[in-house]
């Protein structure tokens, strides 16, 4: 079995053997070692391809704001952001100021929209790092303006979020006049209303009666702004499902997330040409030959019906391989589906390789993605885990190295 033997410099002596100088050094180097053969493969060409597919679909006049929150839906935000910007994304969207700062620290200079808003105390960082906050309350504007004044910097761009039916973030359309009054005041000049947006609640529902209503409210809100002479340059509404279902709502910019990673919230709103960017693989750590009647794993929930060969796979729920899939999930070995047997444990899962008698320790196992002619799709994993594809992707834990 080739685990890639650790290079000599990666082997860190135990802390107690070293003096204080050495200890500091060891702490810096310790995490570099990777021995366990479980990893997530990220295909950056697929990320680029998916961005191009979305760009073609929305046309040259509509910008793409690539959503890379939650560490790029688990793909690694900085690498994903680089791929998307190189492939023509106008900017990036994150949820948290912290995520925006991480992109800046990673050398990303493209516009970064902070969808989750400006939490109190984050305004100076927003101004300093050149992030673009989404705002929806007078207090947001006041605190940001104060930070701009403190910094002596240029006006900060903001995007105003109108709640047209999601009932999450945003202000109601009839609260707009109050905000516009403030923007017309002296401090309003410290901010630049670059964009206005809303978020769709039901774009991926089978018969979606809600999006047309939301669009109507959004158009009215645009009219209210226009009547006061405000014409934000970027009007944006659509997530991935909206891009597919509502071409009339692409406006000046779209905000795809899951589509860029190659999936959709459900197969009904899938864009066919997309390629899945993440796959998860491991190797069999050992084979157990066990007689019929043996009960397997915690809780003894499953009894072997025949003499079986079980492959031990070093991947469990602490890696984001949900325990709820126990007894249902399948993996690929030599291109064949093998069932996960008994309860998935924190670090290890058992798979049935009885029908593949030549399989040995070290054999490659694909837990998500393609192997041979078959593939374990993110939709299957979501179904087994009673989750949505977003949760599967974001759930692959930090313990699993991304390659
Ligand atoms: C405001 C906003 N826009 C766009 C997106 C991207 O959505 P999706 O991944 O469905 O394309 C999200 C994600 O939740 C979001 O919160």
Image (tube, rainbow, N blue to C red):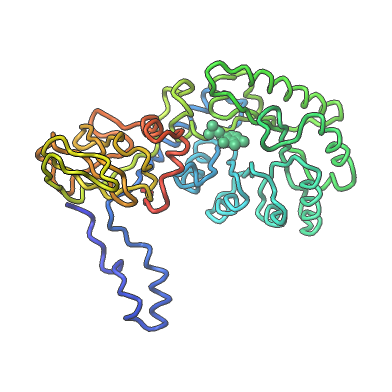
Q: Is residue 347 above or below residue 170?
A: below
Residue at (52, 45) in percent of width and height: 70
Please name whichever residue, 139 or 312, is drawn nearer the observer in this view of the structure. 312
- Counting from the top left corner in percent of width and height, residue 52 is at 48, 30
Residue at (69, 30) in percent of width and height: 235
Q: Is residue 348 above or below residue 243?
A: below
Q: Is residue 164 above or below residue 149?
A: above
- Counting from the top left corner in percent of width and height, residue 236 is at 66, 30
- Counting from the top left corner in percent of width and height, residue 167 is at 68, 32
Residue at (76, 31) in percent of width and height: 172
Q: Is residue 65 visible?
A: no
Please name whichever residue, 213 or 240, is drawn nearer the observer in this view of the structure. 213
Q: Is residue 18 above or below residue 60?
A: below
Determine the image quadrant of residue 378.
top left
Please name whichever residue, 322 or 185, is drawn nearer the observer in this view of the structure. 322
Question: In the drawing, does residue 284 fall left or right of residue 150?
Answer: left
Determine the image quadrant of residue 63.
top right
- Counting from the top left corner in percent of width and height, residue 182 is at 86, 41
Quadrant of ligand 1 in image? top right
Q: Is residue 259 visible?
A: yes
Residue at (42, 28) in percent of width and height: 274
Q: Report how many numbered discs are placed on residues in the image.
A: 0
């Amino acid at each position: 079995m080739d685990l890639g033997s650790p290079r000599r410099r990666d082997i860190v002596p135990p802390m107690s053997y070293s003096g204080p100088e050495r200890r500091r050094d060891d702490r810096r180097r310790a995490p570099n070692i990777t021995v366990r053969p479980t990893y997530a493969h990220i295909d950056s060409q697929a990320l680029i391809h998916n961005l191009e597919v979305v760009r073609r679909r929305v046309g040259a006049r509509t910008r793409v704001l690539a959503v890379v929150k939650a560490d790029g839906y688990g793909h690694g935000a900085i690498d994903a952001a680089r791929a998307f910007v190189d492939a023509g994304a106008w900017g990036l969207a994150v949820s948290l100021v912290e995520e925006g700062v991480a992109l800046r620290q990673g050398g990303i200079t493209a516009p970064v929209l902070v969808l989750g808003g400006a939490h109190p105390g984050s305004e100076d960082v927003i101004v300093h790092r050149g992030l673009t906050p989404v705002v929806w309350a007078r207090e947001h504007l006041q605190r940001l303006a104060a930070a701009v004044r403190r910094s002596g910097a240029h006006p900060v761009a903001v995007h105003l979020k109108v709640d047209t039916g999601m009932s999450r973030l945003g202000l109601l359309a009839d609260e707009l006049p109050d905000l516009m009054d403030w923007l017309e005041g002296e401090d309003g000049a410290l901010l630049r209303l670059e964009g206005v947006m809303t978020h769709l609640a039901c774009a991926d529902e089978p018969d979606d009666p809600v999006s047309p209503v939301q669009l109507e409210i959004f158009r009215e809100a645009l009219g209210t702004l226009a009547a006061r002479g405000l014409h934000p340059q970027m009007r944006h509404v659509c997530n991935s499902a909206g891009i597919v279902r509502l071409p009339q709502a692409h406006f000046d910019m779209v905000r795809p997330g899951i589509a860029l990673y190659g999936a959709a919230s459900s197969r009904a709103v899938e864009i066919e040409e997309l390629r899945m960017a993440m796959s998860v693989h491991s190797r069999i750590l050992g084979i157990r030959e066990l007689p019929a009647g043996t009960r397997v794993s915690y809780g003894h929930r499953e009894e072997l019906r025949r003499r079986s060969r079980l492959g031990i796979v070093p991947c469990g729920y602490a890696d984001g391989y949900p325990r709820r899939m126990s007894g249902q999930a399948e993996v690929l070995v030599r291109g064949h589906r093998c069932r996960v047997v008994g309860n998935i444990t924190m670090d290890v899962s058992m798979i049935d390789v009885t029908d593949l008698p030549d399989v040995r320790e070290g054999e490659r196992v694909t837990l998500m993605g393609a192997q041979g002619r078959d593939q374990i799709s993110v939709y299957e994993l979501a179904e087994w885990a009673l989750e949505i594809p977003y949760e599967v992707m974001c759930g692959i834990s930090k313990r699993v190295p991304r390659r």
